[in-house]
Image (cartoon, rainbow, N blue to C red):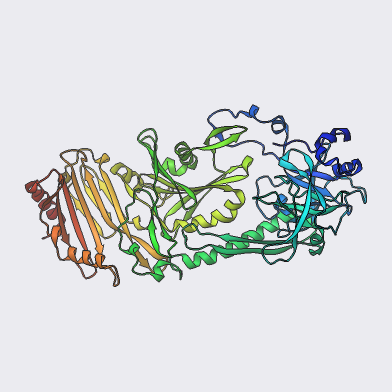
């Protein structure tokens, strides 16, 4: 809720300052009313979002509906002719959608903030000037550099963004700042609310003892920066000194300490200061993130590729129903992890599987029959609309919530190719009224598109997620399955529309009444399609699984390990053909992995090429092309138990077509 700063006449100030009037003289109140300002930004003009109904703006207060500005904090004029506020009110070091700042006086007059004279983010203050603000020398508030504990003080500020009020309390103590104790905050009991930030803490004479900076979250004790600390900060400089903990989404075992520490020369226009601070912030983040990425990427010293060469990731065949991710868990062990998902049906046999995972919202969109893969690739808006349909977002309007149907067209699109040679589509949307952005990375797959997206402050998007998500794309373990129609469409996409994933670059898939060719990596199948008894080839299912192998340049690569085709599924004519390419496990692999490979290589148990029954399916597994480093397994299934004779005939015809001798 936003209202004009102060009422127009002094008489009208009596109700606003009623709580303080028993102890503050009228002339002190008058002085404060002329020297304390709201800090405001312009409300966003236009709204790119689409809602399921008209926004019920009548639910908002009159001030919110009519005020062209958002009130975000407080500033005050001192007798040196400068204006003062808290650093976090102006957020000079951050990127914002609404990055033009103004002050507004009791008459409702608005003045653009002009020149930044001095600031420090750790001490949380800014000194500045405003355009067109006429200031008589000595007309501002005065400093009180010395105040005794247990003295009555008054918090003056734009509490809750609803106008300047004064609330009294006691100056209770001096509290060392938490990092190094370099100075002491003034702690006081006068109430302070959001919007008070940057306002003056004054004594009974209206003299300023500090700038209100922080609110205690657990009790009614709040904090102000003593005026002496502003004077002790170097003139002609802006100091950014911030400490944060930085996290990589897939590194659960550790948070990484990061410090922003740099100076800018002042005085300078606010726009110039913001640009320089933002440039420095991005440089610090980039350098910090690059060092972490270098450590944990596949060629880095912290990667399982280098530290755990017998990791189960190297021996697993991956065909997840929803993408998995390689993560360093809290027990400091690399592994492939998945999350539980929810499902939502789209029209025309489409669906969205979605989940919150690794700090993001993820969704696997299985395209409707009426939508082509090319259309999904070229239309990030459509993909995000599907996500919003499955997992709604809402806009609060007064006491109501209105569903967001679409973010509209993205403000930017680009591509990113990960270390495994998979191209991601990158799209970003802005939500100006909330000062946030939406960033999405989309990976086209045979059955649709997988999306990782975040909805966050524009600063965190531009100086965090936009570097972290590209790193995370390397660790994604996506599914590759779909109908024959899906695969034909996916592999037929022109390179200009979407280039194939690196490990599929030479893949060949052709399934029609005339031929059945499946060439993926080391697996090469070329047989008569009549052998699998297909009625409707388009609706038959094809999938592939893959393993990860070391590669000198990128550290890791995908390699096709399994292909499988099922025909006439759900009928008595169901036939299934699978080829499994198995590499010999590396030395040091688990005993169960080693034993399983030996069992297959020795044609033990069911791998002897003889038909057998498992439930209501008759199976046959044939081992062939055994070398010193690998082998292949041909797996066959037909519908029905104990159909030994039919399976024998099926097996022999496939072996003959492939030129395999038992």
Q: Position of residue 436 (x, y in %)?
A: 60, 45
Quadrant containing the C terminus is bottom left
Residue 622 placed where, x, y %? 15, 58
Q: Which residue is located at x 87 percent, y 44 percent?
A: 24
* Residue closest to the eye, 213 or 281: 213
The image quadrant of residue 308 is bottom left
Asked which quadrant contains residue 80, the reply is: bottom right
Residue 543 visible? The answer is yes
Q: Which residue sits furthest front?
A: 150
As drawn, 244 above or below 491: below
| Residue 21, percent from left and from top | 85, 40
* Viewer-proximal residue among 336 and 407: 336
Q: Is residue 55 left or right of residue 621?
A: right
Question: Residue 633: horizontal and vertical position, in percent?
Answer: 19, 58
Going by the picture, which residue comes out furthest to the right?
137
Residue 635 appears in which quarter of the rendering?
bottom left
Which residue is found at the position 46% from the left and 43% from the top? 378
State whether residue 108 appears in this view: no
Which is more toward the observer, 62 or 488? 62
- Considering every residue shown, the one lying at the far left of the view is 645
Reply above or below: 317 against 532. below
In which quadrant is the N terminus drawn? top right
């Amino acid at each position: 809720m936003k209202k004009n700063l102060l009422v127009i006449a002094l008489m009208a100030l009596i109700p606003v300052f009623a709580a303080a009037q028993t102890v503050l003289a009228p002339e002190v109140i008058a002085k404060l009313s002329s020297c304390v300002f709201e800090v405001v930004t312009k409300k966003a003009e236009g709204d790119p979002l689409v809602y399921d109904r008209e926004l019920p703006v009548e639910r908002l207060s009159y001030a919110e509906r009519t005020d062209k500005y958002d009130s975000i904090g407080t500033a005050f004029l001192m007798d040196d002719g400068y204006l003062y506020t808290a650093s976090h009110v102006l957020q000079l070091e951050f990127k914002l959608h609404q990055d033009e700042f103004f002050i507004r006086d009791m008459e409702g007059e608005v003045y653009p903030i002009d020149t930044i004279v001095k600031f420090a983010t750790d001490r949380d203050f800014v000194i500045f000037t405003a355009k067109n603000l006429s200031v008589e020398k000595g007309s501002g508030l005065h400093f009180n550099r010395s105040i005794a504990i247990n003295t009555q003080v008054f918090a003056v500020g734009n509490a809750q963004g609803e106008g300047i009020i004064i609330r009294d309390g006691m100056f209770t103590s001096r509290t060392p700042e938490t990092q190094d104790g370099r100075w002491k905050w003034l702690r006081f009991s006068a109430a302070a609310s959001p919007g008070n930030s940057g306002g003056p803490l004054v004594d009974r004479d209206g003299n300023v003892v500090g700038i209100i900076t922080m609110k205690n979250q657990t009790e009614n004790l709040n904090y102000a920066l003593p005026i002496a600390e502003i004077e002790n900060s170097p003139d002609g400089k802006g100091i950014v000194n911030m400490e944060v903990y930085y996290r990589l989404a897939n590194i659960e075992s550790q948070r990484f300490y990061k410090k922003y520490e740099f100076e800018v020369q002042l005085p300078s226009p606010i726009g110039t200061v913001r640009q320089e601070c933002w440039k420095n912030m991005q440089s610090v983040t980039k350098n910090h993130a690059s060092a972490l990425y270098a450590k944990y990427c596949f060629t880095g010293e912290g990667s399982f590729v280098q530290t755990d060469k017998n990791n189960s990731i190297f021996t697993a065949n991956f065909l997840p129903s929803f993408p998995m991710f390689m993560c360093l868990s809290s027990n400091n062990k690399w592994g492939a992890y998945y999350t539980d998902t929810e499902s939502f049906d789209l029209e025309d046999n489409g669906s969205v599987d979605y989940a919150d995972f690794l700090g993001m919202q993820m969704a696997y969109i299985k395209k409707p029959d009426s939508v082509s893969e090319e259309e999904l690739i070229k239309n990030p808006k459509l993909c995000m609309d599907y996500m919003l349909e499955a997992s709604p977002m809402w806009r609060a309007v007064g006491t109501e919530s209105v569903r967001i149907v679409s973010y509209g067209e993205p403000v930017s699109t680009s591509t990113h190719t990960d270390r495994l040679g998979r191209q991601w589509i990158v799209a970003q949307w802005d939500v100006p009224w909330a000062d946030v952005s939406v960033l999405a990375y989309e990976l086209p797959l045979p059955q649709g598109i997988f999306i990782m997206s975040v909805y966050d402050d524009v600063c965190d998007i531009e100086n965090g997620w936009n570097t972290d998500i590209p790193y995370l794309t390397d660790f994604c373990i996506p599914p590759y399955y779909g109908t024959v129609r899906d695969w034909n469409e996916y592999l037929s996409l022109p390179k200009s529309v979407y280039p194939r994933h690196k490990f599929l670059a030479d893949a060949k898939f052709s399934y029609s009444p005339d031929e059945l060719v499946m060439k993926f990596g080391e697996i090469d199948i070329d047989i008569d399609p009549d052998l699998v008894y297909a009625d409707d080839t388009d609706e038959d299912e094809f999938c592939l699984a893959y393993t990860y192998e070391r590669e000198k340049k990128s550290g890791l690569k995908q390699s096709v390990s399994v292909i499988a085709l099922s025909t006439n599924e759900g009928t008595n004519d169901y036939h299934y053909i699978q080829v499994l390419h198995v590499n010999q496990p590396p030395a040091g692999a688990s005993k169960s992995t080693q034993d399983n490979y030996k069992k297959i290589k020795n044609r033990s148990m069911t791998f002897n090429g003889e038909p057998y029954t498992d439930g209501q399916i008759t199976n046959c597994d044939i081992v062939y092309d055994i070398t010193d480093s690998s082998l292949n397994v041909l797996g066959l299934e037909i519908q029905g138990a104990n159909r030994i004779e039919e399976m024998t005939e099926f097996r022999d015809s496939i072996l003959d077509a492939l030129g395999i001798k038992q």
